[in-house]
Image: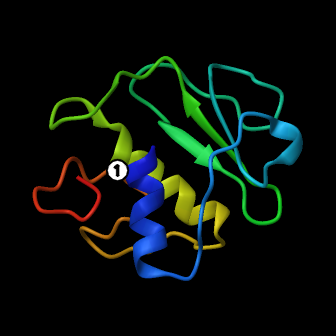
Amino acid sequence: MQKAFKYWSDISSFRFEEVLSNKNSDLVIEFTKQDHKDGYPFDGKGGDLAHAFFPSDGRIHFDSDEFFTINKTDYNLRMVAAHEIGHVLGIDHIFEPGSLMNPYYNGYIDGSPIT
């Protein structure tokens, strides 16, 4: 997660600090599954990986039925997290092949600033 946030702080004026309480945070990250009461239920393994809400909501949800990794197999957590962080910063999908903000998972990208 730290590397996913670092990607955005390296290319913007945003700075992030980890806090241990939701009460003092602008962003909240949760791993959840199925209907988690936000109006956007997850669909189980192999479907939607995660979603996030635009400012000023700040919620980022990952589908805990998915298998996230820190390497090239399955779904790379850093890549998915960086994409979702983009949404909470106000960035919409970009339909450009290979774009971090493409709505479809591109897979692990060697040499990516978030790998």
Judging from the image, the colouring scheme is rainbow
In the rendered structure, the answer to whether residue 101 lies left or right of residue 64 reads left
Residue 101 visible in the picture? no
Q: Nearer the viewer, residue 66 or 110?
A: 110
What residue is shown at x 59% (from left), y 74% (from top)? 14
Q: Residue 31: name its quadrant.
A: top right
What residue is shown at x 55% (from left), y 33% (from top)? 62
Q: Where is residue 85 shown, x and y percent of the image?
A: 55, 57
Q: Which residue is mark 1?
A: 79
Residue type at mark 1?
A: Met
Residue 53 visible in the picture? yes
Q: Where is residue 51 shown, x and y percent of the image?
A: 60, 45
Q: Where is residue 69 shown, x and y percent of the image?
A: 29, 29
From what the image shows, is residue 108 above or below residue 77? below
Q: Where is residue 53 shown, x and y percent of the image?
A: 72, 55
Q: Residue 110: name its quadrant.
A: bottom left
Q: Residue at the right extreme?
A: 23
